Image (tube, rainbow, N blue to C red):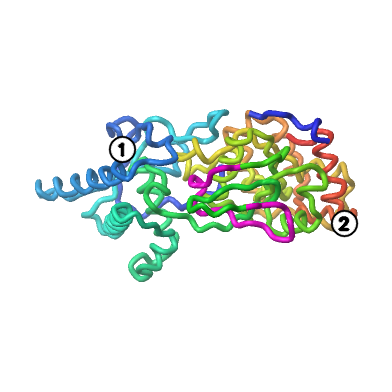
Amino acid sequence: MASSLPGRLGWSASGATEDHSVCSSEVPAGNEAGLGETSGSAHRSHVPSSEVLEAIENVIQDVFESLSKQQAPVLTVTRRSDWRNIEFKDSVGLQMVPYCTTKQIRSDCPRSATKFALMLKILSMIYKMVQSDTYATKRDIYYSDTQLFGSQSVVDNIINDISCMLKIPRRSLHILSTTKGFVAGNLSYTEEDGTKVNCTCGATAVTVPSNVQGIKNLNSHAKFILIVEKDATFQRLLDDDFCIKLSPCIMITGRGIPDLNTRLLVRKLWDTFQIPVFTLMDADPHGIEIMCIYKYGSVSMSFEAHHLTVPSVKWLGLLPSDLKRLNICKDVLIPLTKQDQNKLASIQKRPYIASQPMWKKELEIMAASKMKAEIQALTSLSSDYLSRVYLPNKLQFGGWL
């Protein structure tokens, strides 16, 4: 079976919603010297602490200079979720264009003054953490003053704005993401603190590390990586010993929309081992969206695309065309909701679909049938059909797109 696998392979859910309440003046692309320009640091996975501190000091210095001139201070941030600031590149996925339109978070406008203050508050927290070499999760920051921040999404959005504004990845800002993903299979590595981790497939999986950049001594004999959309399917494959029965592999799940650490780990594994990466998703617009995040990235995080996306990701299943080919009982199929149809139409219009004619055909099949299916629909054929028949056949005979 392993010989049939290729030896080397070379619009998504937004991380935070666009803030329409901000009093902002749009700055055309190219008019803000250096602000929208992609710098070298934007592509680095780690930025030295001295550079982080200097970047924050420059922002605060600008604030003081404005005050000294009796002008209202402003913070200028890139419009991260604006498609005009995004370009599609086969080798990277969705990435930010060299010069972006920006918005100004003004301190003298009632609608944006609160966000201005919160950005300075979080910048001061980051500065102290970098100085003292301590770390915090986004959740830690929110719970440090829940009344001040109001909601976790406000904190998440501001942190992403700061990371994009400074062109410094969140890890270098000493902000950790809360990990929800799991990894299992033929993989071992050493964590930053020296802890040795063995992900050998068994009844339980290992939590994706909170500091993916810090892991080292990665070792694996895996023939491929399988990204599984949902935890239930991931656990079922674990129970069936899928990682060792077919051929050694690594399985990862982000348990739905993947967190940053899960995406970083998939990219690190691909960079390290250069083995095929397959996705196993529900045959519905939500599953396709999640697959696109792994492969092409998300609009709101496009400024970090160079170390988050894996453009070689292949769509293994569940394909809309599989439903008819396998004679899946119509009773287990689910009609597309209006929201599903809108999501599907949105995905079909995205720039990367034009470069994937086979994907485009599958999306057309789903749109025409107006039906979707979960991976669990395969149990209508037999309880272990997924691990015993479906995946082995797909992997052996090249049934991926």
Tell me residue 325's x, y (percent).
Answer: 87, 41
Q: CA distance from mark 1 to mark 2?
A: 55 Å
Residue drawn 69% across the image and 42% down it? 225
For mark 1, what is the residue?
27
For the residue pair 311 and 392, the one nearer the viewer reads as 392
Q: Quadrant of residue 206?
A: bottom right
Q: Quadrant of residue 207?
A: bottom right
Question: If the image is split into quadrants, where does the C terminus sit?
Answer: top right
Q: Categorize mark 1 by other alpha carbons within 10 Å: few (<14), some (14-19), many (20+).
A: some
Extreme-left residue of the structure: 69
Q: Is residue 125 above or below residue 323?
A: below
Q: Helix, strand or loop at disc 1?
A: loop
Asked if residue 12 lies in the magenta stretch, the reply is: no
What is the span of residues highlighted in magenta in the rendered image? Answer: 198-218
Question: If the image is split into quadrants, where does the N terminus sit?
Answer: top right
For mark 2, what is the residue?
380
Q: Helix, strand or loop at disc 2?
A: helix
Q: Is residue 119 visible?
A: no
For the residue pair 255 and 72, the one nearer the viewer reads as 255
